[in-house]
Structures are given as structure tokens and as C-alpha cells.
Image: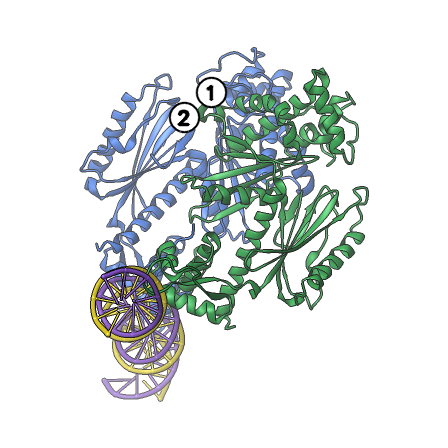
Chain colours: A blue, B green, C purple, D yellow
Amino acid sequence: MLTKSSTELVRQQNSALVLASLRRHGPLAHTDISHHTGLASATVSVITAELEKAEVLERREQQASASRGRPRVIFGQRRDAGYLVTVRISSDMVQYSLADYGGTLLDRFEEPRNHADTATRPFTEAFVAALDRLADRSRIDRGQVLVVSISSKGLVDPLTARLVWSPVFGAQQVDFAALLQPPWRAKILISNETLLVAHAMALRMEKAGARDLQAVAALSLGHSIGLGIARFDRSGELSVTAPNFGHMLNSSDGKLCRCGAQGCIEASAGFYGILRTAFEVPPDTIPAKFVPLAEMDKIALRARQGHRMSEYAFRQAGLALGQGLSRVVSLYENMPIAITGPGTRYFDLIQRGLEEGLAQSQQVRLFGAPPISVVPEEATLVLEGHLDRALAEMDHDVIAARAVGE
Amino acid sequence: MLTKSSTELVRQQNSALVLASLRRHGPLAHTDISHHTGLASATVSVITAELEKAEVLERREQQASASRGRPRVIFGQRRDAGYLVTVRISSDMVQYSLADYGGTLLDRFEEPRNHADTATRPFTEAFVAALDRLADRSRIDRGQVLVVSISSKGLVDPLTARLVWSPVFGAQQVDFAALLQPPWRAKILISNETLLVAHAMALRMEKAGARDLQAVAALSLGHSIGLGIARFDRSGELSVTAPNFGHMLNSSDGKLCRCGAQGCIEASAGFYGILRTAFEVPPDTIPAKFVPLAEMDKIALRARQGHRMSEYAFRQAGLALGQGLSRVVSLYENMPIAITGPGTRYFDLIQRGLEEGLAQSQQVRLFGAPPISVVPEEATLVLEGHLDRALAEMDHDVIAARAVGE
DNA sequence: GACTTTTTTCTCGACAGTCGAGAAAATAAA
DNA sequence: TTTATTTTCTCGACTGTCGAGAAAAAAGTC
């Protein structure tokens, strides 16, 4: 159902536009804002004045007044308007970061995890302690942290802010919102990790000036397989999803996946799947909990030296990925695909199978194979995604707060 | 990118809201419009007055003034505010319908097609002649037809209004816009047939009061296999797509599809695929151009009587569909699935395989199988979809016209 | 150092839109 | 004929955007 519009919503939309253009282009002068947003100068004045009064924007003097004329007044986010924490959960460590409203990283540390340990209790305790540590070290009032953005591999329910299924905790759910007691009042965002990568890739490509960009997919290769899809909807807004790609049925080959099903893509293309094939272990063997990169490197080395079974294992992984991606483009549309994650270092071994798998479908035969790029720096992308989503959320809240009179 | 908002856009949005509520609930009084849209009474007055002046709405006296008080003034669409034509192209016939702005069907006829005939020329000539015939028979000025909505199975490019790949014309494209010479000024809409079914199903379910409805999929079974997905996006608007489901890779079983690829779902689950398996024809045999329903009925009869190969053929079809649907819910989300098309009459033979195929994926194991319903009246649904899309387009144009001062 | 030029920001009045309250209209019941 | 009831219509207040031009603030010019 459509909803009614009103003059107040107009202001909200346009305020959001001003904040968004400041996010994209950095601090801007009145004139530039007007130019980027398409709003009349007078309108920009009213909006910036309001955001200034709300202590969200601040004026900065222009450093070198290059040209003559009245000097520009540059508006920028007040860094202390709020803070955000990002938490990146992976199987072997948890990374905590603190950033301000300007998007500047203030603090960061990692805590190793024991991947054998699947209990949630030690984790939740460490989580609360880590947040306290972040706040204390930077001397930030806990109430000033407005968003905590959490990412993990696996399935996520953004509405209830819970992990539905993760490789780390399985089906055990963690209610993050309940962990943050009163001095804390942050909103919890929870996202699939590869969703954040796709989000960041879409931002990068948009910034790089890809004009007719419709959608981008990110594929993360590692112990598990993740996919994120970022699409610009009709209204031009970015909407990202993390389909259950790793556990989508690939083929009824009986390969046991650690999720308990058989024939998942991950059972062929995840590190444990590659290892199993390379060592000719029966496909219904329960998968290894964790495969160190060093172990994978060894298999890759053998494959590059011509060892048949190792070569075959990587090729089969590529095939499963290619077939899976062909299904993605069949069910969505052709879109550029960015491959990230630790598995990118074996891309040479995977590529052939991947292309072969892609080529089998009508979609690819008709429209050609989607452009594939390899972007190894996954961690950077994840952080970019975290920041953009958390800051957008904060902007949104700032604007909504005006309505109830803050 | 977000776009700026303005008071004019507010009026557009709210006018659209009024027209949409009139579409959903039929002719309404001032008070009811206000209630349904949430707009203030005064606002409704201004909007209806404007639409009345634009000759889009008309006042109708209330028939039986049941209660006392000032009698209500009912607003309804002026039927003569514009007309639309729907064209449904299928392999054996083309159906033309004419409807008015109120959504009432005025005329309809069908023209048989020779399915052996894949040339576009005879078709385009018949198309133009049929449109002339519709206009003449109902004595409607050609300029009054504002939308021509065309549907076919296959892949469609809505932007250029062309069929990209259809079972009827293969890769030959038809430029419909070029066919309509000046007295005609209708806008061409072109949609995949099953997309319209999904659209109509979403409308029906919304009307039936499904509150938390996120998405619906429609699966059409016949000589070819079609899928449509209708989703309510964040803004609550319905967005529908027609993924290339029928030609998504199912498995590398070497079954030749009529699209030229191997292993498509259609090659197992389309009528020609079922026939091929039932008759134990080698899977790389070039598929039959057309399988009469009577022929399929015979195979189904044999299957129901226990003939092993026929039973197996249907079961394999179901398996391919189930596996395909499991991939759909893995890549999108769990959603109700409505099955339509001539193939629904064999649903009893397909069901087991379908459920088996679905059950293999983690998504289904975690969230359960999506609810499946059988809705045989495909033609009705297609028309409903046509009407809703065409009328929405007309409403949209009416409102946009105000901006340039009509 | 006073004036001019240039550039930017700020301010004002006009215009478009929504909203709530209450007046006006139109009917049935008393 | 009057009253009660229901609906539509109208008016003034409020919020918002926009264009034009005034005001501000610097550098250049004589």
C-alpha cells in the first residue's frame, strides 16, 4: 500500500538528501550542497540551520580562500554527534571497532576465538566486556553510542536482530538487544558479512562513476561460501540482501554439508569440501570444523604442481560456484560479480571450473557471462559496509528525531 | 541516489493514493476516501475537485439513501477517460481484449496461431489489424487507447518494449512501438505472462487480508515453465519480476532443452521433457515443437494406471521443479507459491517429486516448505494482472499530465 | 585607504500543499 | 415546521520550497 505524503515528509526527505550528499562528497559549502541535491539555495539554508541547531552539523572555516568573494562556509558532520561500534564475528576472531559520526575510526581491537567453542555464553560475556572497553578507552559516554552494527557469516534476521543460523553458533540464537543494559541505548543492526561486502562494492562502483549500474553481487570464498546482492531499486535506493547461496542445492551428489543437508554449494566449494575431495575422503564424511589456510595452501601447491585429485577438487569447487552463479543470474539478472575472501588466492585453480559452470545456462548464452573481478581485501570492504549502514541509520534517526521535537 | 522532494510531488503522491484506493475499493464517497487514504477531508476535497475538472473522476448519486443526513456523493472513474488493450500471445493463439478506464471488459476475441509459423511478419500484420478491429467494433477513437499491454511467455525487456526471447518467436524481436502509427498514441507495456499471474496473485492475497505478506511466486506449468515473483518493497509498493526460471540450470544431466542449452528445468519439467522421458527417447533428442494436451493426458492416464516410465517422467518433472523452487527460496526468501497453467491437471503426479526436491535444501529444512496452492484459472489471473498494470499506468499518466498543465 | 568587483550567504515575499475546525447543505425523524 | 444527523465544503493556520535580490565578506584596483 502506498502511504500518504505531507509537507513534513518532504522536509525529512530533503534533510536526508543533504546529509547523504555530505556523506558522499565530504564537507561541503552551501552552494555545493545546493548543486548536488538540486535544492534551492534558500531551502539549503533552512535545512542546514536546523541541523546546526540540532548539533548535527558544524561550520568549518575554509582554509585557503583561493578565490575572491565572500568566503565559503563549509558544513560538516559534528564528529561528536554520536558514535558507532562495529563487531565482526568470524570463526577464529571477533573484531571490535569504534567510529565517530564523521566515519573516522577511533579504536579497534580483536579478540581471538576458539573455533571449537560453540557455546554462546563465553561469547556474550566477552561481547559486553569489549563494548565497555571501547567506551572506556575512548572516554565516550555509553549513551553516545547510537548504533552497534554486527556482522557474521550465515543467516540473519534483521528485524529481531538475531543470527538465525551461523557457522559459529549453528542454530543457537543470540539476543543482542537484551545484552545491552540501560546506560547503553544503541540500536542493534545485524548483517550478513557478505551483504556488507556487496553494499560496499556497490558504493565503490557508484563512486567510480558506473552510470547504468543496476546490481552487484559479492561472492566470498572461504571455509564457508557467502553471497550478497546489492541492487538499486526503482527509487534509486540501494537495497541489499544476503541469499542463502552457500547452502543452496547444487546437485544431488550426496556430498554432506556441515549444515546437515546434502549437495549444498558449500559442500563442494567450501574449504572443507575442497579438502575432502582432494584427499578422496568419502563425500558423506562429516566435514572438518575448521581448515587452516596453511592446509589449503598445501593442497593448492600440489594442484599447481599437477597433482590430479587436488586439481580436480578445486575445479569441482569452481564448477559448483559457476553453476550456482548461473542460477543467480537466471533468477535475478546479469550483474557484475566481485569475488572476495581468503579463497581468492586459489582463484587461478577455480577459474576454469567456474567459467565452465557459468557457461551451461541459457542466461549466460544469451547475455554473456557476468563480468567477474577479484577483490581480495575483504576486511576493508566489510568495514566500509558497516560504516555506511550504521551512519545512514544514524542520519535517519537524527532526521526522525526532529519530528518528535528534540 | 535519492531525489529531492517538493510540495508538488506530495500532491502527486496523494492524488495517486486517491486513485489507487478507488481502484481497490470501487467508487467511494468523500468520507470513505479520507478514511482509506488517511488524508484530511479538506485535502480529499481539493484532490477530487481537481481530478473531476481533469475529467478523470465523475460524481454519481447514491442510489438508496439508507441513513439520514446529507446524502453522500460517490466518486468513480469516468469510464470514458481512456481505454486499454491487452494482448495475450501464446503458442496456439493470440487473445485481444479491450477495456475502459473503469476496468470493464468491452470486447474480446481470439485469433488462432499456427505454432509451426515462427515468422514475425504475419503476426505483426495480424496485430495491427486486430487493434483496428477492436477500435472499430467499439467505435473508439484510436487516440483514446492509452495503453496496450502485451504478454507472452519468455524473456522481455520492458524498457525497449521488446520480447528478448520467446518460445513463439525465438530470438526474433518485435518492435511493437514502431507498429503503432500516429492515430494511435498508446504506450506499450510488455510483460512476461507468469509475471502477470504473480502480480494478480499478490493482489488477491492482499485483498484477502494476508497482512504480513512479503512476496508471492507463481509457477506456470505447460509446454514451457514460467515463474513470476511479486514482492512488496520497503515503500510497500508491489514490484514484480519474471526470472528466467524455466531455463535455469537444473542438473548436468545432458537433457537437451529447446533453447539449445542442456539441463534446463524445462527440459525435464516442460511437456516436451515429460514426453521425452516417458517414451524413453534419448535425452539429447531435439524437443517436440508442440505437445497437444490430449497427448499429455494419455501419458498421465498411463502413469495413473501404474505404467512405470510415465510415472517416472512426471516424478522427474516434479523433482526438477522442486529443486528449482528450493533454489528460488534459497536466493530470495520463503514465500507462498501458486501453481497455474495447463500442467496443474497433472499435479497429483508431480507433487511427490516436487516435495522431495524442495526438501533437499537447507532453507526448507530450516524454515519449512513454502505453502503451495494450485490455481488452475491461469487466463483469469493473466487478465487481472494486465488490467491492474495498465490501469495503474494510466492513473500514473493522468497525474503526471497535471504537471505539464493539461 | 577608498572604491569596485566578485562570490557567497542570507532574507523576504510568493506560492503550493495539508490540516483541523467549524459553517453550510441536505436529508430523515419528530 | 422544527430538530437531529450526516456529509460536504470552506476558511485560516501552518509547513514547506523557490526565486530574486539584499547583505556580507573577501580580493583587486586606483
**A244 or A145: nearer the eye?**
A244
Res B104 quadrant in image: bottom right
Looking at the image, residue B149 lies above or below residue A195: below
Q: Which SS class for mark 2?
A: strand
Residue of label 1: A259
Tell me what residue is drawn at x 78 percent, y 57 percent. B125
- Residue B187 seen from this side: yes
Looking at the image, residue A120 lies above or below residue B144: above
Res B317 quadrant in image: top right
**D10 or A402: nearer the eye?**
D10
Looking at the image, residue B214 lies above or below residue B111: above
Residue of label 2: A165
What's the chain of the residue with tag 2? A
Q: Which SS class for mark 1?
A: loop
- Residue A7 seen from this side: no
Q: Earlier in the sequence, mark 1 or mark 2?
A: 2
Viewed as shown, does residue A178 lie left or right of B137? left
What's the chain of the residue with tag 1? A
Give amino acid for label 2. Trp
Viewed as shown, does residue A320 lie left or right of A205? right
Tell me whether the residue at label 1 lies in contact with that at label 2, contact meaning CB atoms closer than 8 angstroms: yes
Viewed as shown, does residue A232 lie left or right of B130? left
Res A95 quadrant in image: top left
Please check whether the numbered discs 1 and 2 fall on a single chain. yes
Q: Residues within 10 Å of mark 1 (few under 14, many from 20)?
A: many
Viewed as shown, does residue B404 lie left or right of C25? right
Looking at the image, residue A229 lies above or below residue B48: above
Residue B367: x, y in percent?
A: 44, 26
